[in-house]
Image: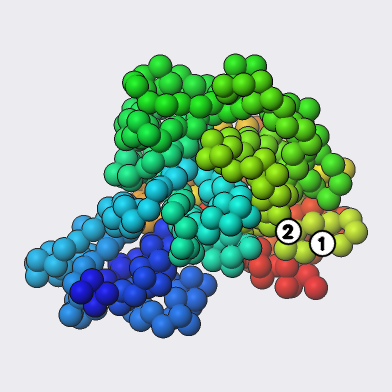
Amino acid sequence: MFLKQKIHFIGIGGIGMSAIAKILFQKGFKISGSDQNENLIVKELKRKGVKVFKYHSISNVDDVDIVVYSSAIKKNNVELKAAKKRKIPTFSRAMMLAEVMRLKSSITVAGSHGKTTTTSLIACILENAGLDPTVINGGIINSLGANAKLGDGKFIIAEADESDGSFTLLPSTIGVINNIDLEHLDFYKNIDEIKKVFIKYAEQIPFYGFLCICNDDKNSKSIIKHIKSKPIITFGTSESSDFKAQNIKTIENSISSFDVCVNFKLKKTIKNVKVPLIGKHNILNALCAFSVCYQLNIPVRKISEGLIKFSGVKRRFSILNKNTKSLIIDDYAHHPNEIKTTLESLKKITRNKVIAIFEPHRYTRINGLLNEFLESFSKADFIFILPIYSAGEKNIKKMTNFKLEKLFKKKFKKKKEIKAVENEDYLFNDLKDLYRNENNIIFLGAGLSTNIAQRFSIYIK
């Protein structure tokens, strides 16, 4: 009976919405959706046979049984209002994800940064171990060419997005907290409010599951004492961690190696674990994946194989084009800590100058973390600032990329070249010479910067 249900997704082109839609489509549900942006995700859904409307209209919810809406959809959306008026059951993205996750034993990955990469690493290990997991991710996994996969195994692994607090609805058998940072200031007031919602998430873990939490991150570590009667394992580089990474090295072809000291229940060291990622943040992501899968009794050999086979996630330090001296990189970093870490990682593998193209994302984030953003570009030699991607927010404080240019110049005085740009024509003319003079070009942002990066990589050929 349920296979005949028709489910309509408002905002189906979002990375989280599309992942759920794909899984339900594969399960036999009749799926439709609407999205005003015809992005690559929408085009892929259409190729699979999903009907996607370009405009929001009351008629789009005619003859549907369930409506799912993304967190970006306003309450006055015509489709959402029509569904409620007609008493069609409506589910938020998180509510529907929770329903899907009840089908299997679930692993959810939460944290302010690194969720997508960690989710992908765990999925890669489970695949390598022959466990055929179902995956719902916040990014395109390169080995799958998709952000979702329906598997026959007993596990479902999903990224748990904390942006609106709804991740506490997810029925998690196993939970992960990578880190907790001041983020999503359009929803949260301060870091204490963010910590409270992570504690609530942790309290959902059942006694027969466990929580894997980073011991290096001060905010994550600080909430452990507030999580009552839950099985907890820790990971990090500190001595007190249950799973400790040590002897960390960067070796050829941007591969990192490290030893894992297992202090949980027994003293044991697994030497020379390798992962094709760089930077301490990615070592912690890999260590987290190792810790979770070790606790699932996956053999160490299978875990290590899964890590070294990892082929990355789209827009996570994705190298679009390279010659012998220069790189063009597309990266999703849009929070100051992410930008700082990504630029530091790039500097470790190159002696050439770093040219950062920064697309500011959300006025609330830029205004709320302004000083942190100014600090985060210390490793860049040249900074281009694109127009701010609003993500639907109102520009109450009248912030612009040209105002940011002045603030960056005041911060760095004449130590760096800084330039706000209005369009691609001006940007590409400058970048062309910089690239050919053996500099590394990195695009940073969560909005349209990836499209600009793709076009530049073609333009330069």
> Relative to 21, is 303 on the left or the right?
right
The tag on residue 319 is 2
Q: Tell me whether circle 2 and circle 1 mark residues in contact (CB < 8 Å).
A: yes
**Secondary element at tag 1:** strand
Q: Label 1 sits on what residue type?
A: Lys
What residue appears at the point 75 percent right and 42 percent down from the top-left corner? Answer: 274
Name the residue rendered at 65%, 16% in the picture: 239
> How busy is the neighbourhood of tag 2: few (under 14 within 10 Å), some, or many (20 plus)?
some
Is residue 296 rendered to the left or right of residue 415?
Answer: left
Tell me the SS state at disc 2: strand
Q: Quadrant of the N terminus?
A: bottom left
Position of 99 with respect to 245 (left or right) is left
Which one is nearer the viewer's eye here, 329 or 236? 236
Q: Which quarter shows the C terminus?
A: bottom right
> Residue 198 at x, y = what percent?
38, 32
**Please, what is the three-letter code of the amino acid marked with disc 2?**
Ile
- Give the number of the disc on residue 151: none
Q: Quadrant of residue 49?
A: bottom left
Q: Which mark is residue 322?
A: 1
Q: CA distance from mark 2 to mark 1?
A: 7 Å
**Where residue 369 sits in the image (x, y, percent)?**
49, 34
Q: Is residue 97 visible?
A: no
Residue at point 23%, 71% (across, down) = 2
- Please report the residue visible at 66 percent of the width from the left and 67 percent of the height from the top: 454
Up-down: is 268 above or below 341? above
Q: Is residue 186 left or right of residue 149?
A: left
Q: Is residue 279 above or below residue 102?
A: above
The image quarter containing residue 187 is top left
In the rendering, at what x and y percent does residue 336 appear? 57, 38
- Residue 87 position in % (x across, y down): 9, 66
